[in-house]
Amino acid sequence: MTSNQSDIGVGIIGCGYWGPNLIRNFNRHPRCRVERVADLQRARAEAVAREFHVPAANDDPASVIDDPRVRLVVIATPAATHFPLARRALLAGKHVLVMKPFTTSTAEAEELIALAERQGLVCAVDHTFVYTGAVQKMYDTLRDGSMGDLYYIDSVRINLGLFQNDVNVIWDLAPHDLSIIDYLLDGQDPLAVHCLGATHAGGTQENIAYLTVTYPGNVLAHVHVNWLAPAKVRRTIVGGSQRMIVYDDVEPSEKVRIYDRGVSIQQELTPGEVYQQFVSYRQGDMHVPQISGREALAVEVEHLVDCIQNGRTPRSDGRAGLRVVRILEEAQRQLTANRGLPMRGALTGGAAAPSVRGGALKGAA
Amino acid sequence: MTSNQSDIGVGIIGCGYWGPNLIRNFNRHPRCRVERVADLQRARAEAVAREFHVPAANDDPASVIDDPRVRLVVIATPAATHFPLARRALLAGKHVLVMKPFTTSTAEAEELIALAERQGLVCAVDHTFVYTGAVQKMYDTLRDGSMGDLYYIDSVRINLGLFQNDVNVIWDLAPHDLSIIDYLLDGQDPLAVHCLGATHAGGTQENIAYLTVTYPGNVLAHVHVNWLAPAKVRRTIVGGSQRMIVYDDVEPSEKVRIYDRGVSIQQELTPGEVYQQFVSYRQGDMHVPQISGREALAVEVEHLVDCIQNGRTPRSDGRAGLRVVRILEEAQRQLTANRGLPMRGALTGGAAAPSVRGGALKGAA
Amino acid sequence: MTSNQSDIGVGIIGCGYWGPNLIRNFNRHPRCRVERVADLQRARAEAVAREFHVPAANDDPASVIDDPRVRLVVIATPAATHFPLARRALLAGKHVLVMKPFTTSTAEAEELIALAERQGLVCAVDHTFVYTGAVQKMYDTLRDGSMGDLYYIDSVRINLGLFQNDVNVIWDLAPHDLSIIDYLLDGQDPLAVHCLGATHAGGTQENIAYLTVTYPGNVLAHVHVNWLAPAKVRRTIVGGSQRMIVYDDVEPSEKVRIYDRGVSIQQELTPGEVYQQFVSYRQGDMHVPQISGREALAVEVEHLVDCIQNGRTPRSDGRAGLRVVRILEEAQRQLTANRGLPMRGALTGGAAAPSVRGGALKGAA
Amino acid sequence: MTSNQSDIGVGIIGCGYWGPNLIRNFNRHPRCRVERVADLQRARAEAVAREFHVPAANDDPASVIDDPRVRLVVIATPAATHFPLARRALLAGKHVLVMKPFTTSTAEAEELIALAERQGLVCAVDHTFVYTGAVQKMYDTLRDGSMGDLYYIDSVRINLGLFQNDVNVIWDLAPHDLSIIDYLLDGQDPLAVHCLGATHAGGTQENIAYLTVTYPGNVLAHVHVNWLAPAKVRRTIVGGSQRMIVYDDVEPSEKVRIYDRGVSIQQELTPGEVYQQFVSYRQGDMHVPQISGREALAVEVEHLVDCIQNGRTPRSDGRAGLRVVRILEEAQRQLTANRGLPMRGALTGGAAAPSVRGGALKGAA
């Protein structure tokens, strides 16, 4: 950084679970200083400010946006408030970092992107996972050509999760998977989305969902998110023609496994010979690369400061946020449209008294 | 068994991978004896017969069916031949055991069921997994009432698999998952099916597929089958309101894990209070029951002999086979109908030049 | 706590790796407040004080001991300084909490114990692991009688560890294992110790060691500590006649596994019968109990405050520290005595030119 | 093989657990044929012969040795009978393959080696593990120079094992570990042995033991064998200065893990600087090589046939057997000498009433 670049005052709106992590990481950056925090629960804001040496705190988001020392507004509030707060901050000439999901609609996302461009400001989304050493290693492996053709990405993110009162499981968990997929695919636009979900345990929103997204080049992405699973699974498989990657985020020390395995088929069949014989397997070594264990949020903060100071576009900019929201919006449309309706592909052949047996099934028969 | 029950001569058609296991298990049963085997590759049939002390072998399936010492015909041939061979055997008055998938259509399955009933013969399907100690333990746990309400079954069966020349991945692998689900649900009829798949690596049939099946009572079943995965995963999660089960078939000694965990929500919201506070978690113990390590095929043979000798209905009878085939048939209809078509839920918002970026993605950009 | 019990001012000497954890946990306790810290690196002490809101900091340990607001002195300095600092603090009428190992000799440990008793002060050792939910669960399981007779405890604690400049691997790592064993055995005195070690990688102190400790009742404890292992293993097996426990501290969510397995032998042999037939195996279920995930140091602080305020003896008092030091001291004596000497049990039968082949072994032969 | 090499008739003495595997593998080799088997339980010999198509069987070991069609006698009987049977076979001019442990004393082993040399016959020991793909991969990695200096080998082989009536746990299990170590060290002669063990559960022989073996070049080998462990562990760590290997035989598909990790220390200390700063860590990648999954016994049979036909020395010859027996013999001498005696390193400092507390410990106090 050159000396004429001034330091960055940071203001944080929302002091929930993620707030202390944000403050800690911004304050550790040599060119940043958290100047002010706000939370609707004023006592919470004040306690956090005291613990983390933030000079000012109250319950008014506007005070953060309007504080002249604040150049970057971090919005860590419920999703529904992201748009109005980010819009106001951009209008006030402040850079913004918005937690995921970026917004609750593509229209909102597009308006923020346009506004930031007009204002010449950075508008970033906290897609934390794309700043992990693991995802960076996957990205580099995809880019070095050794994977061959990309076939599919399969991502599972399930655990016994806290039900949210305002969003369902796809808005809560799938942004992680979709932002990883979006980054790995270099921001490629998806072609189509399919989503199925279920609402159990007395919830009012879907707590299990299966999301399929297709991309050009016959690439299939599938995301399973679930708040009702007994054990935590966070596993993304990236299948290519030459190599395949398994990224297991629960694994403490071997998160990324690169398999030197693949399948290829020789198409021409000699008459009389069996097709199977033409499948060629490669069962090669497996490699666990050393990956950076640096805290993703620290990497993200450093990257964001660089973008603000040098006019660069963040890896997780508003457009990345928009692409993720577009998928979520269409998925939500399908979930809402299908609530209470039978799935297509109804089976009529075996209709004899299913309800009776069904009832027996779920009780203590 | 009473003394007036004669022993059972067994004939086996098809001496491929599974053939020796079938012979070995039938021959180990004190009331069975494999009398004859056949395989289109006559040398294969003769080698197997020699190694396993089977008196007669040739390349003619009819010789097995017509052998008067044979009372039970085991059909271990490619799926397309199941129906004609089983039909002929039933018409000849022989009991039949057919490998999975039972048939290639519901019409065939229904005809075989009707024929077996008319003839008073046993018609069974080799749904091997339902005879494992692990699945039996899951079944018993579901039946003892301790699971509470059943929410979902999520099954993943992926590995680097041999492409088949005649069937796609759902006909090859999903019968395992679907037969387990069918057994756990006591043969309940599914309501609807949804299936998405992809064909990669130069294959001519789908080698990745996601299959969703809904059942009465808001039960969602999901099956992921994949021949293009770098490592073997065979894991079924059964989610209930009170307890949840994870069945990991790759795990050598702890296949079934029963989690005493659940989620429940108290519906009434006190005004002004946060909804989340009403979610009640249970984070209890986990239990790994000792399960029988007896070979599933031995259990199945014993069960089948009992059914034949005592006129009982096999756990995996033709109707179980039919229920599985009905799901596969509808899934196949959807896969076939959608080949080359875009998925519903097309996204038009971000249509700027995806193909260029897509091309870049899969090469060594 | 009754109202006439005053709060406890805490002073901490040593602001290294563990210092911030100590400050954080004492400050979180409602009856404690860290009043002063010291570190030979004054800047370090001041930085820590600033970050964690400690009123006073400098580079003089005496200032902590002599501060009238300080009732409890926490000693988190290198092992060689534990004794003089703890002695001075006790003489000044302060309670002490000393990091592990308690002291560098039994003589020092005994003097501190005697001094604390004379002064009527609490003298505790930071045997952190005995305050974990996992070790507490093991303790309770041993005490409920369901384990049967205790046979052995086998503990492995290995990783790629930082060489210490002042202590070898047994003084660094084994106190964890020995304090766990000591707690599980209710402070029973060991009968004998055996220790073997090796010094590699250019170190000046042993970086691999195997420590065997025998206890009354034919109980064998074995500890493997190693700074030269490629992956982290922290696993303690407790073998009993009726049940066995595996405690795997690296496992994120299933640290304690209780196996309902055992072996028993019926002693009388019928003439002519094979002895093996009298071995009776039990291959039962395995149980993973839910254990408290509360931070061990928070539990320890709460327990220590209770001991100070109510005159109780801490679970990890000076006597527990002494028992661990006694084992380490004897192990060290053996290691020192045997440095450079051949192990007993020399083999002379195969003495042909071992050095030549040995040299070949370790090169690129 | 050249055409003038005649095929090898094989005779097998002992038809227990391992017998069928031996017959199967010898019969699968194109140049071998099992001609005769014997077992003291004649019915057992006959049943095995019938199942595996062996022409002759009875209860007389001499009949195998004396059968003129038998050129190789395989001795799969209890250890105490290895010497007399192998001696008789060698005297009769037959090659021998003896199960592990080779003999029960070095004197026996030396006599067999000398006899085989005089007779010009192959005398091999069934050290099966040295023929696995995993151990071969470890051997090759040690030989390619990339490991740097060898520091230690730590081997754990524990499970809930069947008590033997004639041998203790070291004679039963440790030959596996010791033969692996012997092979990895190219048959280097050990310098010294130390062994500690315990007898529990009413057994008459040690069922837990810790065995330490030192080798030239400061190489430390440690073996933990245990019949009283709740879960199976079979893990060997090989530590070198540049790389380290973990061989986990229980792992189904990733048995060998090669860690590109090491520790080195720069010896010279600058005055005033901290020693720790001179430790240099390498935390590199981890690599799981593809290893041959071929059955070890098939590899061993092929190797043995080659040795017999071409006059080569087997990888696991009598000398390898002798080196393993020499360690076991010294270990046994120490175990026997120390039975009932206290371990050296007695601790007298804490002698207050240990027996009382010890009694409390093991009951349901």
Image (tube, coloured by chain):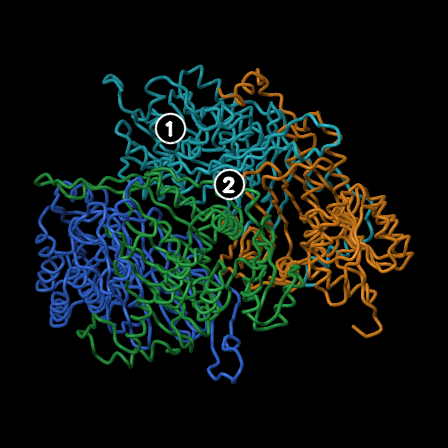
Chain colours: A orange, B cyan, C green, D blue
Check the image and report above or below for D220 versus C291: below
User: Badge 2 local density, few (<14 within 10 Å), some, or many (20+)?
Assistant: many
Disc 2: which residue:
B235
Kind of element beneath mark 1: strand
D8 vs D88, left or right, is right
Q: Residue at x 60, y 45 (%)?
A: A156
- Tag 1 residue: B73
A35 displayed left or right of C207: right
> What chain is tagged by disc 1?
B
Point out residue A14 in the picture as x, y percentages from the top left corner.
76, 48
Q: Nearer the viewer, mark 2 or mark 1?
A: 2
Q: Taking B48 as reference, is D2 above or below it?
A: below
Question: Which of A229 and B25 lies nearest the eye of the viewer?
Answer: A229
| Residue D188 in view of the camera | yes
Q: Residues within 10 Å of mark 1 (few under 14, many from 20)?
A: many
Quadrant where the N terminus of chain A is found in the figure: bottom right
